[in-house]
Image (spheres, grey):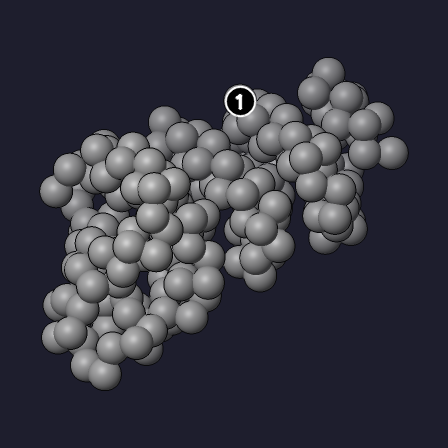
Amino acid sequence: MCYESLHVLLPELHKLNPEKTKEMITNSSLVANALKDVNEDDDFAVKLKCTVLLAEIWSLFPTLVSQGEAGSAVSQKSKSPSEVGSKLKGYENQTLLQSFGEVIRNGVMEKDNVFKINSIAVSFVLLDRLAQKKSSGAADVYKTLIYALIDNYRSKKCDKTVTKLLLGNFLIIFTNNPLVPLTPLLEPYLAALMEAVSTKNPLSSDEVEFLIKIA
């Protein structure tokens, strides 16, 4: 499936006719296929394209994701899975919100660094859009990115590139969305930072800048 083309096409279709675009997604197996491939395909390129597409769908239709049932592929309106696409093995007891959230979590925690960095970037774009729409899903993405930051600090090999990416994007989020609370991030971050910092591992310029700007 041409996930990359769909990711580019969906926002344009949404501009022209949001309801028709939503209906197209709801009444197809697009989400079912993307969820299947992001979890089962071994090709990181395919997995990333699926992640980007699912994040795009979530940002365009946050209500659809928060109310949909993963076990029946997508539709909130359907009476049976066959009305909207194939049954999703492994998702029978999950909501779409849980399934989409799992995709984001898996992406930002991926061991492959290239995939992880791209997933983090995608997740921050998603967080920004959901926060602007005041979607409840923003809290889930926010918590996932906080966890990714703390986990990176506590890993045996703290990746400075990942740290810089996360801190820089959090600053952008706080600037663009003043209503996003700092408190959920601050306490665990400061605790993890204090554990990591020593005379042999002083604060980086990115960490200093972050602390100054959130003060």
Name above or below for residue 65 compared with residue 76: above
Which of the 4 image quarters holds residue 135? bottom right
Quadrant of the frame with the C terminus: top right
Quadrant of the frame with the N terminus: top left
Closer to the camera in the image, 27 or 96 = 27
Can you see residue 203? Answer: no
The residue indicated by pointer 1 is 161
Q: Residue at x 27, y 36 (%)?
A: 9
Say what amino acid the circle numbered 1 marks.
Thr
Residue 114 appears at what percent x and percent y? 36, 27
Q: Is residue 166 left or right of residue 63?
A: right
Residue 202 appears at what percent x and percent y? 75, 21
Q: Residue at x 34, y 48 (%)?
A: 17
Query: Mark 1: few, some, or many residues within 10 Å (few <14, many ≥20)?
Result: few
Q: Residue at x 63, y 26 (%)?
A: 168
Which of the 4 image quarters holds residue 171? top right
Can you see residue 207? Answer: yes
